[in-house]
């Protein structure tokens, strides 16, 4: 009988692990758009042109649930997995910042040197990584692909010289 | 290099051809292995490399290098999967959160195949191109530089031997450099060094006089070489040139293009592309074919005699 004693803490651990899934209580809206690429198709490499949807929407506005304290990055990761959209990021744990390199196989610098993904919450473009923005109930997240460092989508931030 | 370079143990047919043919062949095969990142071409290259190293080196050496190759190939494939997450077919999600895509797996395998093929080709190269062939070849192309290099290489062991002679003589004269007080040893070492400098300069003058007396530097001086360019070599040159031209045309016209990301796509398989693949395979298998042909002739002759 004693040899099964290890099962008790193992089961407890398993139960607590299952139970620690947070309750998704709050709601927000998220959308992913690469419409700016449609205006600059000649700069996009040939093999990626077919990845750009005709209307520019990789993900139309959808309501998603999230747990309290989650960041924009957590929501993005969950949504892209659910909708089977490809997403690649690189994490810098030192700064607690996740950088989104590509969504839907459309990567940064695919449309010139000023191209990449930016996000805005309630029409405001934060100047830091998406894993550092704590969401609130009712926030509207928009992920947009810019071809000119944000000037074409309204997210341009003047770099200090 | 081991004694293999001078004894004629390498008795396969391809090594018996003129060194220019050998070099041309390896340059072609290595260049195509490195440049053509196409799954079919890479597989052809690996197969040809395997067959060639079996023919040229024998089973033992291939087995030894395979033991090294397979883990290296697996590591290359795994590393690509861990760092590259591009691709349209997501199979799973890695613990880091990034996707594991089919395209990155296949790209990793292709890179591993290329690495293995290159290692095997370099193995073949080292077995066919012995040091005397390389010296012969580069002596023809840059005679002055190869002369300087061979003289430098000759000088170093000579200097070492003479140093030992001088140090021993000084030791017998009561000026050892390996025992005694440190200051004394340094003084004696300086003496030996100054003797060596004098000897080197004198040796240089002697060598120069000897070379001058044997006609080095005279216009029209020829060098003996055991390699003759015969009809067999001419035929091989024509064949290699034909293969080179065909493959270069295929590459330039885009028949060998293949994209891995985001979706895997390449030229559709039509007749001309198939011919190109066959030419690639034939080029790679040239030494194997030549060796097999010679073996067959030799057996026929032996049977005829018996």
Image (cartoon, rainbow, N blue to C red):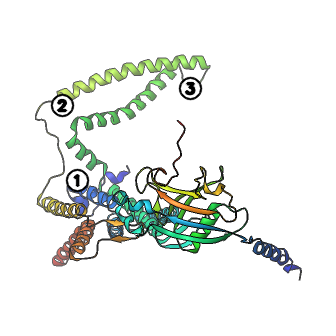
Residue at x 40% of width, y 56% of height: A111
From the viewer's perspective, tell me whether residue B245 is left or right of residue B8: left
Residue B300 visible somewhere in the drawing: yes
Instruction: Using the rendered image, report if marks 1 and 3 lie on a common chain.
Output: yes
Does the residue at mark 1 contact the one at mark 3 (Cβ under 8 Å)? no
> Where residue A45 appears, x then y in whole percent?
36, 60
- Badge 1 local density, few (<14 within 10 Å), some, or many (20+)? many
Dot 1 falls on which chain? B
Instruction: Give SS at disc 3.
Output: loop
From the viewer's perspective, tell me whether residue B235 is left or right of residue B23: left
Dot 2 falls on which chain? B
Disc 1 to disc 3, how far (Cα)?
A: 48 Å
Instruction: Give SS at disc 2.
Output: loop
Q: Nearer the viewer, residue B301 or B269?
A: B269
Identify the image quadrant of residue A20: bottom right
From the viewer's perspective, tell me whether residue B248 is left or right of residue A157: left
Kindly identify which numbered label has been placed on residue B178: 3
- Badge 3 local density, few (<14 within 10 Å), some, or many (20+)? few
Does the residue at mark 1 contact the one at mark 2 (Cβ under 8 Å)? no
Q: Residue furthest bottom?
A: A1
Dot 3 falls on which chain? B
Residue at x 22% of width, y 59% of height: B16
Work out whether B289 lies above or below A155: below
Kindly identify which numbered label has been placed on residue B216: 2
């Amino acid at each position: 009988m004693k040899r099964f004693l290890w099962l008790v803490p193992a089961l407890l651990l398993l139960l607590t692990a299952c139970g620690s899934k947070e309750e998704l209580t709050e709601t927000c809206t998220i959308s992913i758009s690469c419409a700016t690429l449609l205006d600059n198709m000649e700069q996009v490499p040939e093999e990626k042109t077919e990845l750009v949807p005709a209307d520019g929407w990789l993900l139309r506005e959808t309501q998603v649930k999230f747990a309290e304290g989650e960041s924009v990055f957590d929501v993005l990761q969950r949504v892209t997995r659910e909708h089977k959209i490809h997403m690649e990021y690189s994490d810098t744990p030192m700064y607690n910042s996740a950088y989104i390199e590509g969504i839907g196989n459309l990567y940064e610098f695919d449309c010139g040197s000023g191209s990449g993904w930016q996000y805005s919450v309630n029409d405001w473009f934060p100047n830091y990584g998406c894993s550092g923005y704590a969401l609130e109930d009712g926030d509207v997240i928009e992920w947009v692909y810019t071809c000119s460092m944000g000037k074409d989508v309204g997210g341009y931030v003047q770099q200090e010289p | 290099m081991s004694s293999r370079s001078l004894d004629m143990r390498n008795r396969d047919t391809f090594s018996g051809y003129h060194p220019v043919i050998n070099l041309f062949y390896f340059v072609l095969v290595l260049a195509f292995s490195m440049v053509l990142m196409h799954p079919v071409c890479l597989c052809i290259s690996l197969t040809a490399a395997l067959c060639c190293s079996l023919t040229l080196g024998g089973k033992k050496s291939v087995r030894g290098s395979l033991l090294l190759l397979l883990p290296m190939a697996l590591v290359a494939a795994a590393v690509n999967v861990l760092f590259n997450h591009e691709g349209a077919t997501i199979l799973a999600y890695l613990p880091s959160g990034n996707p594991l895509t089919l395209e990155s797996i296949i790209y990793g395998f292709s890179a591993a195949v290329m690495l293995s093929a290159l290692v095997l080709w370099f193995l073949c190269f080292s077995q066919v191109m012995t040091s005397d062939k390389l010296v012969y070849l580069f002596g023809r192309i840059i005679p002055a530089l190869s002369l300087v290099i061979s003289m430098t290489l000759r000088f170093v062991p000579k200097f070492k031997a003479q140093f030992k002679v001088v140090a021993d003589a000084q030791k017998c004269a009561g000026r050892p450099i390996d025992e005694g007080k440190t200051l004394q040893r340094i003084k004696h070492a300086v003496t030996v060094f100054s003797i060596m400098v004098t000897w080197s300069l004198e040796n240089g003058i002697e060598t120069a006089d000897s070379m001058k007396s044997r006609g080095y530097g005279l216009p029209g001086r020829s060098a003996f070489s055991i390699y003759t360019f015969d009809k067999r070599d001419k035929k091989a040159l024509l064949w290699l040139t034909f293969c080179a031209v065909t493959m270069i045309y295929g590459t330039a016209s885009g028949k060998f293009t293949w994209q891995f990301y985001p979706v895997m796509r390449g030229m559709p398989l039509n007749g001309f592309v198939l011919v190109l693949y066959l030419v690639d395979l034939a080029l790679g298998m040239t030494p194997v074919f030549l060796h097999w042909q010679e073996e067959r002739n030799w057996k026929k002759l032996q049977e005829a005699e018996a």
